[in-house]
Amino acid sequence: MASVGILLIVLALATGNISADAQDVDKGIGELLATAMNFLNQTLSRLLEQSLEHLHRVEALWDRLTELEHNMISSRLDSNQTLSNLESREQKPPVCERGMNETVSEPFIILADDSIGKQIRCDAHTDTGGWIVFQRRAVGDVDFYRNWTEYRDGFGSLSGDFWLGNEALHKLTKEHSYELRIDFYADGQVYYAQYPTITVEDEENKYRLGLDPYSEGTLGEITGSGLSYSDRGSFSTFDQDNNDYPNVNCAVSNHGAWWWYNGRVHRYATFTEMKMRRV
């Protein structure tokens, strides 16, 4: 019995020690877990802060890339528009107008004029250019002794001698205001005359010429009054005598159609060019 009692006492003591050790272990594990959790929380906090910082950098980078993309698109659109404008300018035919000598190197060009339904010869350089040539006698390859219908419709070649046509002159001067210039070579001298306004009436009114007074030039030196004597004159051909000179068809006597008013004529001309410019 004594032995049993001693054994029970030993077991009791042993059981008490084990319980004490278990409590110490539980306490240690709790502290370890608390430390681990604290470390984990701190680590997660740092990682979160770093992630947010990286996220902000990524967002800033994305914004910058988006801005660059927009700039590139805008630049490409501007470049395309500029190219389109240049192509449009290159494709757009020139217009016969004052100041065209700055962009056109040739002394004259042939252009289509829809308002009269035919091509025109445009003097691109004289007095800054923009002159529609309607009469040219320089080569001597065309006979100007023509009838009424031919002068109405025009004849000759724009690259040589020609008359644009009285109907074309009427249509042009009816729609817009034009000034007149005449270049004239005679006896080795160069002359010119300019008039601020020219009008040509319709066929019913015999393509009557209207001119404002002679404004400038040297043509009057050999004609006395330049073309002013033809102002209000009707156009005459060998088959239609509309001049006011009694008993004489000036178109026949001078072997050429004109706005004959009293039968006067320019003599000894080796070159004449009549042209008008929109004002």
Image (cartoon, helix red, strand yellow):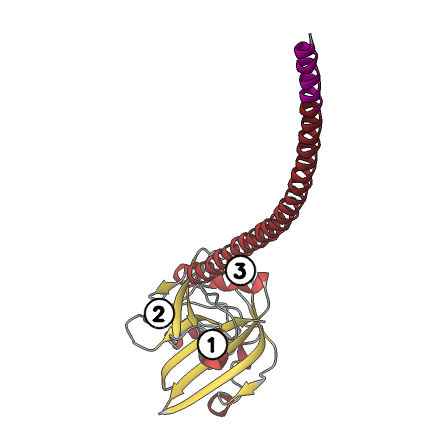
Q: Secondary structure at mark 2?
A: loop
Identify the image quadrant of the C terminus.
bottom right
- Label 2 sits on what residue type? Tyr
Q: Residues within 10 Å of mark 3 (few under 14, many from 20)?
A: some
Q: Quadrant of residue 24?
A: top right
Extreme residue in the left direction: 141
x, y percent for residue 160: 32, 71
x, y percent for residue 259: 49, 72
Instruction: Please tell me whether the stretch drawn in magenta is mainly helix, strand or loop.
Output: helix
For label 2, the residue is 145
The numbered mark, 2 or 3, whose residue comes first in the sequence reads: 2
Q: Residues within 10 Å of mark 1 (few under 14, many from 20)?
A: few
As rendered, which of 23 and 42 lies closer to the eye?
23
Closer to viewer: mark 2 or mark 1:
1
x, y percent for residue 180: 53, 76
**What residue range appears in magenta?**
2-16
Closer to viewer: mark 2 or mark 3:
3
Q: Are marks 1 and 3 in contact (CB under 8 Å)?
A: no
For label 1, the residue is 102
Q: Which mark is residue 171?
A: 3
For the point 66% across and 32% down, which residue is it?
29
- Let me know if residue 46 is in the magenta part: no
- Label 1 sits on what residue type? Glu
Q: CA distance from mark 2 to mark 1?
A: 38 Å
x, y percent for residue 167: 48, 60
Q: CA distance from mark 1 to mark 3?
A: 28 Å
- Let me know if residue 3 is in the magenta part: yes
Q: Secondary structure at mark 1?
A: helix
